[in-house]
Amino acid sequence: MSFRRYDVLEPILRVTDARMAVAFDSACESIITSAVAGRKAGERVRSYAATDFMAREQSQQAILKLKVYNDLDLSLEGKLIFFVANTGYVGEYDINGLPINGGGHGEKITIEDTKKLLYLMENKKIKNWIEHPAFGYLLPEPKELEKHGLHNFRKRFNLLRFYTADEIAKFYERDAEERTKFLEDLFKGQEGENELKEVINVWKKKIPSSSQIKKFFELHYME
């Protein structure tokens, strides 16, 4: 899947939990880069990833996808690789969706970055993974990515370059709340809503402390 974010979403991530895969699939994230009617630049938007061959309510599509993902197995040894690629920036916008210092503050995820990451992901070249400190999805180990030719990956995408640990924690809290609310509203009143409770609530995780977040990035993204 392709998302477009300008803050804390990593260049690429891998999901091994079928419930989280459905949650991501049901709420594609993007950013409004220029003002349009009724929306301001920097506003985050989410949309359901419609599947053309599934002519049914979103909840029924989600239930079917959950079964498919479970059957195919999203684990590292499974038959299906589920990943999300961010085609935007890291560290460009603040918590309010405004460019930091007027813009140019963050690190652009280039087309070459994305092509290389997709190649490594699809061909199972990545051997070492680390868990996201808040949500538990998998990230390629940054040092290994540098060995695959993604030079200075640790420095470029270290969130501590752009935000304090406290600010990162607030981003995680906001994302968890907004993602949960979107899914609640999306499936509300639809047939099978109760079967999707674990999908809807998959983001309700304990957000790590600022010191834990700082330690994570110092360990994995610093020399």
Image (tube, helix red, strand yellow):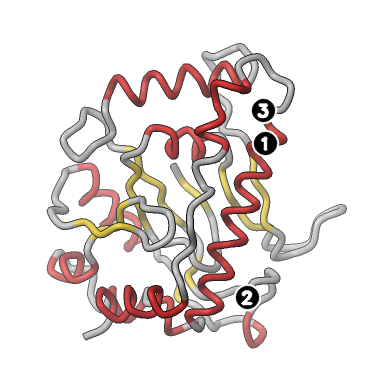
In the rendered image, the vertical position of residue 196 relative to residue 143, given as above or below: above
Q: Left of 6 or right of it: where is 45?
A: right
Pointers 1 and 3 in contact (C-beta within 8 Å): yes
Q: Amino acid at mark 2?
A: Asp
Pointers 2 and 1 in contact (C-beta within 8 Å): no
In the rendered image, the vertical position of residue 139 relative to residue 167, given as above or below: above
In the rendered image, the vertical position of residue 121 relative to residue 194, given as above or below: below
Q: Amino acid at mark 3?
A: Phe
- Find the distance from the CA under tag 1 to the CA under tag 3: 6 Å
Q: Secondary structure at mark 3?
A: helix
Q: Which residue is mark 3?
A: 187
- Find the distance from the CA under tag 2 to the CA under tag 1: 26 Å
| Residue 94 image label | 2
User: Nearer the N terminus, badge 2 or badge 3?
Assistant: 2
Q: Which residue is mark 1?
A: 184
Q: Left of 187 or right of it: where is 111?
A: left
Q: Secondary structure at mark 2?
A: loop
Q: Amino acid at mark 1?
A: Glu
| Residue 59 image label | none
Q: Secondary structure at mark 1?
A: helix
Q: Residue at x 67, y 56 (%)?
A: 44
Q: Nearer the viewer, residue 189 or 31?
A: 189
Q: Quadrant of the C terminus?
A: bottom left
Q: Nearer the viewer, residue 73 or 152?
A: 73
Q: Residue at x 50, y 19 (%)?
A: 63
Residue 195: x %, y % from top left? 54, 21
Residue 191 figure quarter: top right
Which of label 2 and label 1 is nearer to you?
A: 1
Residue 177: x %, y % from top left? 63, 53
Which of label 2 and label 3 is nearer to you?
A: 3
